[in-house]
Image: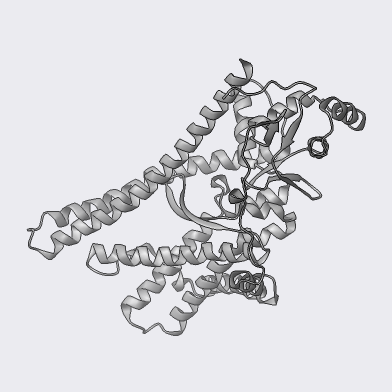
Amino acid sequence: MRMPQITYETRVVLVPLTIHENKRNIIVEDVYAREYYEMSSASVDAIRALQAGMPLHEIEVQLKERYPDEEIDMIEFVSALLELDLIAEVDGRTLREISDEEAVPAHNPDSWPNRLGRFLFRTPFILVYFAAIGCWITLFITRPDLLPELHTMHMVESMTVNVIIWAGVSLGLLAMHEFSHFLAARSFDVSASYGFGHRLYFLVLETDISEVWKLPPRKRIIPYIAGMLNDSVMLSLTLIIRMIYPEMNDLLYEILELASLYLCVMLVFQTFVFMKTDLYYVLETALGALNLKERTHEWMKGLFGRRRGKEVTAVKVYTFFYLAGLAFSVRLFFNVMIPQFLHFLEHGRDYLSYPVTDYYFWDGVLFLLLNGATLVLLFNSWMRKLLTIYYERTERMQKQTAQSS
């Protein structure tokens, strides 16, 4: 479909937009698409004027008087809104159908997730989480024997049973981590959803709490760190149980040690801010530099293209952590992940050398199938991400071509 030509006589109708203002940023929310955009004061004033039905030329004159130091071009601005799919009608011509079915269903403030979330994250109960952080730090300092070790991953002779235990423990703890994000978000009456994703070559279960952008910056912190707070409580519990009952059943003790190991890995993983982990969003909010990773990419492209871009100090500092973290991940992948994967693959292959009637043969088959399923989920996440990028670029190019013709 050919994009309409924008002139000063053009009349536009915007899609339903909500503006969220705070001290550092102004966020414009596409109510139906649940997408959020950081905009300047001039842009927001232009949107409000468009919503009021003012002509483009009149809006431009007023904005130039109000913002004499900024370059105001309403034709260019409206064209940008077209590319973002934020315009419903142009001169009576419908560009985007808006129906009630698109609306995000409102959540009942008195539903059990909202009430439970408010109790866990918006009452004095939250002090329990910070006490748990102090607890596991103290225990690791005073009782270094409680530190988990990698050998705990080999709990039984069967490789398949080991994988099932790893998967059960990791998925259970990960589900609790993500459910904490969900409850913390719902405690502020914003929606959330689950799904599989990836961080580089790590398969993750993630919660979409993008509507947290509606909240003031200080209120976003708890939903972002809720998973880490839950991990700290669970880590403290596993350490305390192992300390109080050291003579418990060997397998149960090793499962608790495995849980401790996994929780430690998850907490360390959140410090990898170059991969948009929980602490990345905390850092982004604290610095007031939204879309920090994307802005870093654009700034780096400008440097490599010999076009020095202007950016805030936060972006330049994040560039260092981004490149250092990326280098660390590549090294971790080749020095740890691949050797570990090949080690387990060799074990599985050795088991396949047994006769078909032998238990170990089928143990090896199941082991390889379980690992294969994990790889399929990871590659599926990669492909969905790549396809999303491809379709977005294709759609953007088509709009630019239609607009120029």
Q: Is residue 235 left or right of residue 33?
A: left
Going 27% across and 48% down the picture, which residue do you hit? 342
Going 74% across and 31% down the picture, which residue do you hit? 12
**How far across and how far down the image is residue 390, in percent?**
48, 32
Q: Is residue 136 left or right of residue 258?
A: right
Q: Is residue 34 left or right of residue 355?
A: right
Going 63% across and 32% down the picture, which residue do you hit? 95
Q: How is the image coloured?
A: one colour
Q: Quadrant of residue 134?
A: bottom right
**How far across and how far down the image is residue 98, in percent?**
63, 43
165 and 192: which is toward the camera: 192
Q: Is residue 129 visible?
A: yes
Q: Quadrant of residue 154?
A: bottom left
Q: How many marks?
A: 0
**How far across and how far down the image is residue 336, in percent?**
37, 49
Position of 3 relative to 247 (above/below): above
Q: Is residue 228 visible?
A: no
